[in-house]
Image: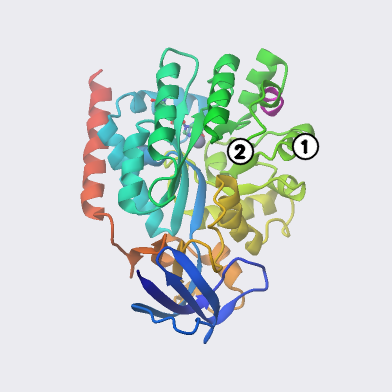
C-alpha cells in the first residue's frame, strides 16, 4: 500500500471553471482518492509521502494518440520531403534494417522523451511490438500498442498473426496499463480483402483498430481513382468502422466524410505538426469537434515532427486552427481537453484523462515558477501557449512516480541515448554500403 499526498495548484480537467489554487490530491496505490482545496483530504488519510509543490500545477498526464515511438531512431535522417517520397525513398529502406533490439532501444528513447515532456500514455503503431511492450512495461507508462500491418505483400499474413499474438499476450497486462489494437497501416497500403480480414479479427478478439486515413490529397486521389470513393467512404463501405476505431490524420475530408466519422463513432488522432512538416494540409478540427467527433492529439513519429513534445503540439494545433479559421478557434482549455480527456476517450481508457476520485493516478506537475509563466492571468493559456517540455517536473503513472525533480526514475537516460546513437549510425552505414 502506498499513500501519497501532493500539495499544489490543481487543474483537474473536469470543467473549465474548476481550479484549486492551493489544492490537495490524495493517491492510494494506483488510484486518486480525493482532489480539492486545502483541507479536503479524507479523514484518516495518513500519507507515506508528501510532495510540497506550491508553485507547480498538477494536471492529468498528456495522451499521445498517434505515434511510431521507435522512429526516434530516424530523427533528423529524412527531412523536408512530402509523404510518399519520404516513406518510399528514406523511411522504409531505413526501417528495413531495424532489428527487434533497435526497436526496443528506439522505443525506450521515445519513452524518455515522453516522460520528460509530461506524456503518460501513447498509442503506438510499429513492428516488433513485443519489444515495444517490454519497453513500456519497464518505463512504467500506459500505452495502446498496434502492429503496423501493410497488407499488400507476403508479410501481411505474418504481421497479422503477430498482432493476434500481441492481443493474447499483452491486452490488459501491467495492471491494465497496456492494451492492444490492430494497426492496418492505411487504405492505400492494405487491400480490401486484407482490411476485411483485420476487421474480422478485431471483432473476434474485441479490440480496436488504428489506421492512417486521408492524410494527403494524393491519398484521396489514389483512392478515388482506384475505388471511386474518398478514403473514409471506402473504409465505411468495407465495413471497417462500427467498433472502436482511431483514424490518424483525417486531413482531407468532405462534409459527408465527417458525417460518417460521427455516425460510426470513429475517433480522430490529430497530428498538426506532422501534417505541417510533410505539407499534408490542415485538418478540419474545428468542424470535426463542432459536429461531435472525438479528437485527440498526436505527435506522429519523431521523423515527421521532429519531437514528441505534446506541449508544442497543443500550441501548434491551436495556432494552426486560428490561422485557418479565426483567432477564437481552439482556445486553450479546449486544446488541453483534446490532450487529456479527448485522448483518453480516443484510446478507450475510461479511467484516465481527468483528476477525480476513482480515476487512475496518471498525473504530471509543471513548474510554474519561471519567467515565461508570469503574471499568472490564465493557467490554461500558459500551459498551451507558453509551456514547453522542459517545464515538467514530476510524472506519475498508475500511482507510481516515473520522474521527480526532472530526473527519470525508471529509465537510464544516458545509456539509452548512447544505444540509440550507436544503432542509428550503424543503420546509416549499412545503407551507404549497399
Ligand atoms: N513496415 C513495418 C510495419 C509498419 S509500422 C507503421 C509504419 O507507418 C509509417 N509512418 C510513419 N508516419 C507515417 C505517416 O504520417 N503516414 C503514413 N505512414 C507513416 C512508419 O514509417 C512505419 O513504417 C513492418 O515491418 O511490417
Ligand atoms: Zn503515423
Real-space CA distance between mark 1 and mark 2, rounded to the nearest whole angstrom: 17 Å
Residue 210, picture quadrant: top right
> Which label's residue is closer to the chain start, 1 or 2?
2
Res. 56 visible in picture: yes
| Of labels 1 and 2, the one closer to you | 2
Residue 218, picture quadrant: top right
Lateral position of residue 39 relative to residue 389, left or right: right
134 relative to 405, above or below: above
Q: Residues within 10 Å of mark 2 (few under 14, many from 20)?
A: many
- The circle drawn on residue 171 is none
Q: Position of residue 145 (x, y in %)?
A: 44, 39
Lateral position of residue 219 relative to residue 182, left or right: right
Q: Residues within 10 Å of mark 1 (few under 14, many from 20)?
A: some
Q: Is residue 233 magenta?
A: yes
Q: Position of residue 321 (x, y in %)?
A: 67, 50
Q: In what quadrant of the picture does the C terminus appear?
A: top left
- The circle drawn on residue 259 is 1
Q: Which residues are magenta?
A: 230-234
Q: Residue at x 74, y 33 (%)?
A: 257
397 relative to 65, above or below: below
Q: Position of residue 181 (x, y in %)?
A: 50, 36
Lateral position of residue 102 relative to residue 222, left or right: left
Where's ligand 1: which quadrant?
Answer: top left
| Closer to the camera in the image, 152 or 305 | 152
Q: Residue at x 70, y 48 (%)?
A: 324
Amino acid at each position: 500500500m502506498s499513500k501519497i499526498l501532493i500539495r499544489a495548484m490543481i487543474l483537474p480537467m473536469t470543467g473549465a471553471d474548476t481550479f484549486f489554487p492551493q489544492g490537495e490530491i490524495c493517491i492510494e496505490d494506483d488510484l486518486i482518492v480525493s482532489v480539492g482545496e486545502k483541507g479536503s483530504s479524507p479523514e484518516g488519510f495518513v500519507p507515506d509521502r508528501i510532495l510540497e509543490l506550491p508553485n507547480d500545477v498538477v494536471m492529468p498526464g498528456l495522451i499521445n494518440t498517434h505515434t511510431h515511438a521507435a522512429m526516434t531512431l530516424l530523427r533528423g535522417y529524412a527531412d523536408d520531403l512530402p509523404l510518399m517520397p519520404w516513406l518510399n525513398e528514406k523511411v522504409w529502406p531505413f526501417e528495413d534494417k531495424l532489428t527487434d533490439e533497435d526497436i526496443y532501444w528506439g522505443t525506450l528513447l521515445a519513452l524518455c522523451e515522453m516522460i520528460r515532456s509530461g506524456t503518460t500514455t501513447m498509442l503506438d503503431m510499429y513492428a516488433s511490438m513485443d519489444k515495444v511492450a517490454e519497453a513500456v512495461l519497464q518505463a512504467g507508462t500506459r500505452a495502446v500498442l498496434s502492429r503496423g500491418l501493410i497488407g499488400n505483400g507476403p508479410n501481411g499474413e505474418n504481421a497479422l498473426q503477430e498482432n493476434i499474438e500481441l492481443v493474447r499476450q499483452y491486452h490488459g497486462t501491467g495492471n491494465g496499463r497496456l492494451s492492444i489494437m490492430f494497426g492496418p497501416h492505411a487504405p492505400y497500403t492494405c487491400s480490401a480483402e486484407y482490411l476485411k480480414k483485420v476487421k474480422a479479427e478485431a471483432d473476434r478478439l474485441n479490440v480496436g483498430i488504428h489506421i492512417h486515413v486521408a492524410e494527403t490529397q494524393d491519398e484521396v486521389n489514389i483512392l478515388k481513382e482506384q475505388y471511386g470513393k474518398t478514403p473514409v467512404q471506402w473504409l465505411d463501405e468495407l465495413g471497417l468502422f462500427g467498433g472502436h476505431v482511431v483514424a490518424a490524420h483525417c486531413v482531407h475530408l468532405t462534409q459527408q466524410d465527417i458525417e460518417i466519422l460521427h455516425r460510426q463513432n470513429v475517433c480522430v488522432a490529430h497530428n498538426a505538426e506532422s501534417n505541417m512538416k510533410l505539407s499534408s494540409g490542415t485538418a478540419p478540427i474545428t468542424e470535426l469537434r463542432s459536429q461531435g467527433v472525438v479528437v485527440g492529439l498526436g505527435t506522429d513519429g519523431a521523423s515527421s515532427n521532429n519531437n514528441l513534445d505534446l506541449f508544442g503540439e497543443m500550441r501548434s494545433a491551436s495556432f494552426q486552427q486560428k490561422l485557418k479559421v479565426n483567432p477564437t478557434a481552439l482556445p486553450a482549455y479546449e486544446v488541453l481537453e483534446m490532450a487529456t480527456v479527448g485522448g483518453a476517450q480516443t484510446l478507450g481508457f475510461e479511467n484516465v484523462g481527468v483528476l477525480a476520485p476513482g480515476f487512475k493516478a496518471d498525473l504530471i506537475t509543471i513548474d510554474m515558477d519561471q519567467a515565461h509563466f508570469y503574471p499568472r492571468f490564465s493557467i490554461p493559456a500558459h500551459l498551451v501557449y507558453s509551456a514547453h517540455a522542459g517545464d515538467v517536473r514530476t510524472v506519475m503513472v498508475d500511482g507510481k512516480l516515473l520522474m521527480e525533480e526532472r530526473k527519470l526514475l525508471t529509465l537510464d537516460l544516458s545509456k539509452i541515448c548512447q544505444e540509440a546513437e550507436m544503432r542509428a549510425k550503424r543503420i546509416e552505414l549499412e545503407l551507404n554500403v549497399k
